[in-house]
Image: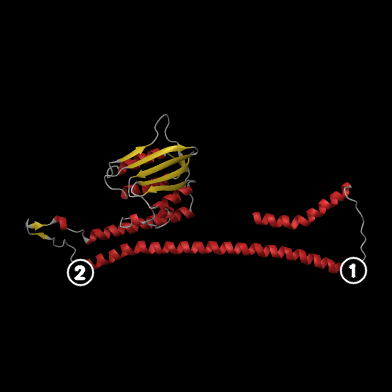
Amino acid sequence: MKRKLTLILIALLPAVLGFITWQIFRTGLLTDSIIYLRASLGLLLLLVGIILTILIGVVIAFYLLFESRTQKETISLSTRSSTEHRQFLQRLDHELKNPLTTLQIELANLDEEPLHASPQPFDQTQGKPDSAQQTESPLKRIRDQVSRLNDMVFQLRKLADLHSSGIEQSPVKLDELLDELVTEFSVSKPNLTLNVPRMPWSLPEVRGDEDLLYLALRNVLGNAVKFTQPNESIQVRAFEDTSHIVVEVADEGSGIPDEELPYVTEELYRGKNARGTPGSGLGLALVSAIVERHGGRVSVRSRINQGTVVALRLPRM
């Protein structure tokens, strides 16, 4: 827009200067005089042609300059988009390869062994099978990997839907969603606390899709539970911040390195500390997409060996 305005001003500059000069002569500040030109019609047409050629040349030059810059920006955006798409496909390939390899191995084992329970290692000192040495059954490992793939497909579908369809716009009570989630996760994580204002008034409502916001909060809280040890605490807190509602999930986990923080909300990105932990790598990416569709944003603060804070800022009603 600024470039177009500049081109228009440049094109109008000769006319503006001519108008200003004409007005100066009219006011009498300068002595105006009449100039009589005597020239053949051919010469006059030649002069007009030269002037028009110069003007057209200037316009074309500016147009080519503008087009060149636009083309460079388009190529740059296309290259960056292509790089991001390639990185996404590489991550997707990596995430799918592990469960599919496990499924292939376990199915091969099932072809070689009967489906009934395999003999358990025998503890000669006790005269009975050693339960400590029992391993998971192939069927259980297959179910786990299928569940992981189903979760990944669900998250990918949700991400696609968020970019292509609208969202519901209804009043949502975040404090009620947090109460429900904390009650659910407290069964497996007793040292989980909730700090939400109750008086003199409760947390204001936000406008949006209740199911999507529930999913976003559940993903953040689920990540905190997943990446903390049983003896480490998690705190969920919510408060008003001018025109926004802020929900923070803070944990005492191992933390995220500074160099990884800019990438944690990208699709299928998994940091060093996340490797070996079950997950799709899409949780925070989906959270970020949901919050952005609601006009908010997600931020992550973290310190190694101290913990992580994931904050969701949503516009209040």
Observer-nearest of 297 and 181: 297
Q: Position of residue 146 (x, y in %)?
A: 30, 59
Identify the residue under disc 1: 41
**Number of marks in picture:** 2
Q: On the rendered structure, is 158 left or right of 43?
A: left
Q: Position of residue 175 (x, y in %)?
A: 39, 38
Colour mapping used in the image? secondary structure
What residue is at 53 percent from the left and 63 percent from the top?
78
Q: Position of residue 198 (x, y in %)?
A: 39, 32
Q: Quadrant of residue 90?
A: bottom left
Q: On the rendered structure, is 69 left or right of 87?
A: right
The furthest residue to the bottom:
42
Amino acid at the residue labelled 1: Leu
Q: Quadrant of residue 251?
A: top left
Observer-nearest of 110 and 315: 315
What residue is at 81 percent from the left and 67 percent from the top?
50
- Disc 1 is placed on an element classified as helix
Instruction: Kindly report the distance in space between the C-alpha atoms of the residues bearing marks 1 and 2.
Output: 102 Å
Observer-nearest of 186 and 12: 12
Asked if labels 2 and 1 touch by Cβ distance under 8 angstroms, the answer is no
| Few, some or many residues within 10 Å of mark 2 (<14, 14–19, 20+) | few
Q: On the rendered structure, is 52 left or right of 100?
A: right
- Mark closer to the chain start, 1 or 2: 1
Identify the residue under disc 2: 112
Q: Quadrant of residue 217?
A: top left
Q: Find residue 159 and name its label.
A: none
Amino acid at the residue labelled 2: Glu
